[in-house]
Every structure is written in C-alpha cells, then in structure tokens.
Image: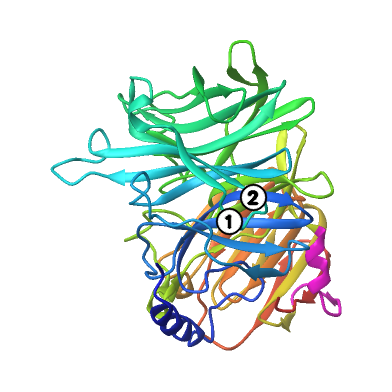
Amino acid sequence: MLDKASIKQMKAQVQEDKQWRQGYHMMPQTGWLNDPNGLAYFQDTYHIYHQYEPYKATGGATHWGHKTSEDLVHFQEEVIFLSPDQPFDQDGVYSGSAIEVDGQLHFFYTGNVKKPGHYDYIYSGREQNVVHVVSPDGFEIQSREVVIAHEDFPPGYSDHIRDPNVFSQNDKFYMLLGARTDDNKGAIILYESQDLDNWTFLGDFLAGDEDQGFMWECPDYSDHGEHSVLIFSPQGVIGDHFSFQNPYSAGYLIGNVDWDMGRFLPTEDFQELDYGFDFYAPQTFKDAKGRHILIGWMGMPDIEPEYTNPTISYGWQHCLALPREIEVRNHKLYQKPIEEYQALRGDAVNLETDKSYERSALYELNIAGENLQVLQLELSQDSQLTYDGEILTLRHGVSGFGRKKRQVKIPAINRIQVFGDYSSLEIFINDGEYVLTTRIYPTRSDLSIRIEADQEVKATYWPLSET
C-alpha cells in the first residue's frame, strides 16, 4: 500500500525544482520513471502506462504508473495501475504491452522475482513470469494471473526473458519476448495462442550473433502493409564514434515475416532509432487516426559514471519522449513529432543567420535549407549542434552533467526540427530520418538561439506553452 504521507512529502520536494521540471513532457510526479508500457487508445482515451517507482528517484521494484489523455498532448495523472504485491511479481511489475479484444483491454507484463540466496540473477535465482491482466476500462483490474511461468520457458536461455509484446495476426495471437541465451546472445522468442491464456512456444522469431549484443529487450512488432517493422533494444553492442555510442541502444529492422515458420526475415540492416544520449525501450501503438505512434523513455540504464541526472536531489528522475509518428520510407523508418504539438505554439518568429535571438525556455525551432554543408546551432547554455557536410555533432558542456558528444554520419541535411523543454532537447533531421534525444540541465538564465550556416536558410522559431 502506498504511503500517502511520504508521497505528499516527495511531491513537495519535486516542486522545489524550479529549473528542470519539464513543461510539456510526461514525467513522474515523484520518484523514478522508465519504460513506456501498455500503450493503447481505448474507449476514446489514450492510456500511457510506464515503469514507476514513486518512492525512490534511483529506481527499485517498479509499479505501472498511468496517465491518460484526449489528445496525446495534455495528460492526466491517474492512480497507479499495477504494483509488485503478488508472489509472482514481488520484485517488480516489469514492462509489457496491451491489446484490445472483445471490448476489454488485455495486458501482459513480466513479473520479476529475485530469490534470496547466493545467485547471480542472470543464470540463476531469478524468475521472470508472464502475467495476463484483464481490465474492462483501463483502470479496474478484473483478473491477474500467470500464463507462462518462468519454469516453463524452453531450455537454452538465461533467466532473462521479459517484456511481452502481444498482437493479433492471421486470426491468432502472438507474443514476442526479449531474451538472453545461455551463450550470451540476444534473441526474440515467439509464442502463439488462440485464447490469450494458453501459449505455445514456436522458437526464435529472430536470433542474434556475438556481435549484436548479449540481451535484447522490449521487442515491438508493427505491420506497415508492404513492410513489417521489428523494434527492440539490444544491450552490449560494441559501438564506434558514429554508432552504438550509449551503453544500450534502441533500433529497428525492416523486413517480412514467414508466419508458417514463425521467423522475422530482415530486408535491411539494423538501424538505431536515436543517436542522442537518452532514448531507450520505445513502444508503438495505433492511435485514433490509424497512425503508428512511438513513445520512448527519455533515459538510459546504467549511465553512471559517464553521466547523471541532477534531478535526483529533488526526488525525481527521467521522463518520456514526445509521441512520434513513424512510417517506412526509402527503406528507413522515419520519426516525426505528432502534429498535435503545434497547439502549444505561440507567435512565429523568423530568424536570420549570424544573429543571436532571445528565446523562451520552451520552444520549437525549424530550419530548412538545401543540401547544407556548414551549420552551427547554439541551442542552450552550452549545447551546440554542428554539421560539416558529413558528420553531425551534438556537444554539451557542464549542462550535460557528463554528457559530452554524440556524432552521426549524414550525407545531406535539408531540414532540422528542434523541441526544447526545461531539461531536454529532441532534434529531428530530414523529417525524422535521424533523431537525437538528450537531457540537459542548464543553470544559466540567459536564453538565446544563434544560427550560422553556409547559405541563407528559412528558420522559424515558436515559443511553446506548458501543458
């Protein structure tokens, strides 16, 4: 049972943060937030659930927090949906998904259990149970039971099998689970069901090799007509100066599925979804307009000691990225902020190059050019975006709290869109062909934008309102 007095005290502590609490991004009322879960449009309402530890800004045994919205811009905080209060999830209600069937929402999540004793909790001592929850309205829990117990998983895998993604295809239900094999390779395994309660293991939907990470988390499948998209978050991919620069990554494969064999067949190489510092564990769903919407955690596991988030001292940490519409174009997955956020815009201001302009703390910036070769943007206290015709570089100074530099090779840039909040930047290149997401923690009060380029560009700035 949640301690109301402690929560009240923590809320007051969070309110003391006058500089970094977000203005229009989803963040926790108190404590820790991570993966988005169970995203759904149901009964004319958007339901956004997420990993949540209300008492500790550093995480712990997670609950499912719950936010609702009518427009995916303004959100209402709801009562916690699920808590780790059962023997099969006592150490965390881990990530999962939702599916609507016959007018009810069906949720599937991983119930995490760590047995007491001398265990490594990778190959022994951990249970990760698949739990099925039925709700008539997204608020009330009608039933909650284990449908795949940990001991029923097939041999060949470690104790790390989690994050069920359930969907329907060809009059059947399928479940994907992220996994770590006994020989330390990532995999996504596939189950099949006719009734959502009885599940049959079919095998590896996709298997990795030794260069593709030791664990694949948060699988997410979506059907885009001619193409299928498989999103997941690999851990342990060895990076270089221009790719896989974070401890863990989030990315996608485009391909097709052989449903008779139960195999995903990639037609393109694995691509990262985001090249910034803070983006992980994204999940997709279809909205009221039939768009594929992606929401990710604006955070990253195991970032210390490289960088940190100073909001911990105020009793909160992390937020969710803006909802993004995704679509397959030119053999890539493009991401763009949903157009509904234009409702936050104030009066437009046209900007010229080589001039500094005052800005509001919350803003949107659009820059359009033609095959830009030289570009430099001063975006925040000491956050800078530069392009030399080949390499895009995002740099932070002290406001990055350890975040220094991320780079990506881009053959041509024609458009840049930036969303700035009190403690974050989301940067979309070429209508979302490339994206960089980062937390920042500026301490200076001077707010300005400066654009330098090798050509005249069309630059428009809007102040944004809080939600």
Residue 346 lies within the magenta run: yes
Residue 3 lies within the magenta run: no
Asked whether residue 426 appears in the rendered view, the answer is yes
**Whether residue 399 is situated above or below residue 329 in the rendered picture:** below
Q: Residues within 10 Å of mark 2 (few under 14, many from 20)?
A: many
Element at badge 1?
strand
The residue at which mark 2 appears reads as 39
Q: Is residue 309 left or right of residue 412?
A: left
Q: Please state which of residues 315 and 364 is positioned toward the viewer in this rendering.
A: 315
Name which residue lies at 64% across and 84% down: 447
Q: Are marks 1 and 2 in contact (CB under 8 Å)?
A: yes
Q: Is residue 215 left or right of residue 255?
A: left
The residue at which mark 1 appears reads as 49
Q: Which residues are magenta?
A: 339-354
Q: Is residue 31 left or right of residue 342?
A: left
Q: Provide residue 448's location: percent of width, then percent of height.
A: 67, 81
| Quarter that holds the N terminus | bottom left
Q: Please state which of residues 201 and 357 is positioned toward the viewer in this rendering.
A: 201
3D distance between C-alphas at marks 1 and 2? 6 Å
Q: Provide residue 345's location: percent of width, then percent of height.
A: 81, 74
Element at badge 2?
strand
The amino acid at mark 1 is: Tyr
Tag of residue 343 = none
Quarter of the view holding residue 119: top left
